[in-house]
Image (cartoon, rainbow, N blue to C red):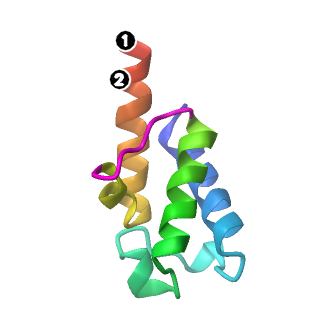
Amino acid sequence: MDRNEIHTRLLALLTGVAPDIDPASVDPARNLRDQFDFDSMDALHFAVAVSEAFGIEITETDAAALANLASAEQFVQRRLTGAQRA
């Protein structure tokens, strides 16, 4: 799965958790909490959705990697690449 596919899927998951977010308005480098009314429950739901959609485990310490879209993309890419090598 390439980075663009991951980006597109993450945006879909994000808007699934917070439907009021316009995907075109997301600044990938900016923290989701700073951009939107994205609280801790939204963050938890997003982490669960990412875990289920990509089939990767996300620990409590990994959750910080999902704070913005750019770091979430990198995190998922690393996990998927690591999973393919294992």
| Image point (64%, 58%), residue name | 13
In magenta segment, residue 59:
yes
The amino acid sitting under disc 2 is: Gly
Element on which disc 1 rests: loop
Residue 74 on image: x %, y %: 36, 46
Q: Is residue 41 left or right of residue 13?
A: left
The amino acid sitting under disc 1 is: Ala
Residue 15 marker: none
Q: Is residue 35 left or right of residue 16?
A: left
Residue 33 on image: x %, y %: 42, 81
Q: How many marks?
A: 2
Q: Quadrant of residue 78?
A: top left
Q: Nearer the viewer, residue 43 or 12?
A: 43
Q: Is residue 33 left or right of residue 22?
A: left
Residue segment shown in magenta: 55-61
Q: How many neighbours does mark 2 have within 10 angstroms: few (below 14), some (14-19), or many (20 or more)?
A: few
In the rendered image, the quadrant that contains the C terminus is top left
Element on which disc 2 rests: helix
Residue 84 on image: x %, y %: 44, 16
Helix, strand or loop: magenta stretch: loop
Residue located beneath label 1 in the image: 86
Asked if the residue at tag 2 contacts the one at tag 1, i.e. Cβ–Cβ closer than 8 Å, the answer is yes
Residue located beneath label 2 in the image: 82
Cα–Cα gap, marks 1 and 2? 6 Å
